[in-house]
Amino acid sequence: MERFELAEALVRQAGAALRQARLEADSVRCKSGHQDLVTVWDRKTEQFLRKGILEHFPADAIVGEEYPTEGTASQEAVWYIDPIDGTTNFINQHRNYAVSVGCWRQGKPLFGLVLDVEEDRLYHARAGQGAWCNERRLAASRRRNIEELLLFTPDVLRTFLQPAPGGEDLLRLARDVRAVRSIGSVALELCAVAGGEADLCVATRSCPWDHNAARIILQEAGGVIAALDGGPLPLNEPGTVLAAGSPEALDLVLKRYGGHENE
Ligand code: 2AM
Ligand code: CA
């Protein structure tokens, strides 16, 4: 079995189990605080994905949210997995959460899969082959007028009121765009940009397992993703992610609101 096929089978199985999952009060734990949560299902699902991947591809490396990295970046393929992206939604809403699996080889994208579990929508892309939501081809937005853009962010409070260095002008951006919306899952937010439902996304403190699958989908849909200063988004470090439907829209935002003012 190829890596992509394996990944799709594992993600769909993980999604089916999560749809059936019912949380007991004692299966939720705080990590760094009461707004940073993990459940037994995050752990179980990540174990399931890791086991399935390593059974078929024992020499691959795995970077996931809940367990230490297995292998090193020099290995043939590196998998970035988030068993539940949007854990808070999983707990409180039982919707708007995703299983996210991205695979890279020597720093180059192979494929990304993001399953919107409750909607049973699989966003998927293989490098060079376009981006899809189930069987529907995705195309990112071409809008370029700031006042027409819809800005998605998974964390309204921190993004605008406690901005990361260089993000001090994001509140002005939020006032200038058509509206700000929040799903609460970095992966689903980036897929919304890939599908043209959002024009921009800014996510502070995003981790490699949050965005490395969806960024492949976004790029295959014609969108762009960068660090907040406009530089390339690192593959293996957390940071603020800025995504747009087109290079022109990203440039516009960076010029007018970026940490490194070009005007
Ligand atoms: P998670 O559900 O996998 O933790 C919502 O805040 C979005 O930000 C989610 O995609 C969430 O991913 C992500 N996120 C990652 N690290 C976070 C942190 N330390 N605190 C809050 N959200 C975090
Ligand atoms: Ca997670």
Image: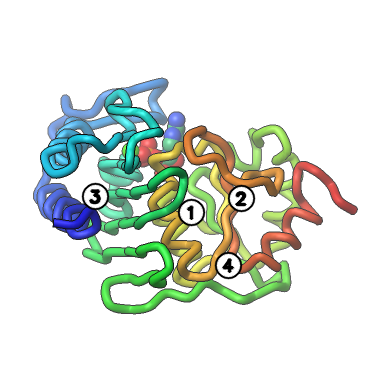
Q: Between 106 and 111, which is closer to the camera in this rendering?
A: 106
Instruction: Give yes or no for contact between labels 2 and 4 (Cβ–Cβ under 8 Å).
Output: no
Residue 157 appears in view: no
Residue denoted by label 4: 245
Q: Amino acid at mark 4?
A: Gly
Q: How many marks?
A: 4
Which disc is residue 182 wearing? 1
Q: Position of residue 244 (x, y in %)?
A: 60, 62
Q: Amino acid at mark 3?
A: His
Residue denoted by label 2: 226
Mark 3 residue element = loop
Q: Position of residue 72 (x, y in %)?
A: 36, 29
Is 60 on the left-hand or right-hand side of 217?
A: left
Characterize the local packing of mark 1: few (<14), some (14-19) or many (20 or more) Cα atoms within 10 angstroms: some
Q: Report whether the residue tagged 4 is closer than 8 Å to ligand 1.
A: no
Residue 135 appears in view: yes
Of labels 1 and 4, earlier in sequence is 1
Q: Is residue 15 above or below residue 122?
A: above
Q: Between 36 and 72, which is closer to the camera in this rendering?
A: 72
State the separation of the CA atoms marked 3 and 2: 30 Å
Q: Amino acid at mark 1?
A: Ser
Quarter of the rendered image showing ligand 1: top left
Q: Is residue 146 above or below residue 67?
A: below
Q: Between 61 and 170, which is closer to the camera in this rendering?
A: 61
Of labels 2 and 1, earlier in sequence is 1
Characterize the local packing of mark 2: few (<14), some (14-19) or many (20 or more) Cα atoms within 10 angstroms: some
Instruction: Give yes or no for contact between labels 1 and 4 (Cβ–Cβ under 8 Å).
Output: no
Residue denoted by label 3: 94
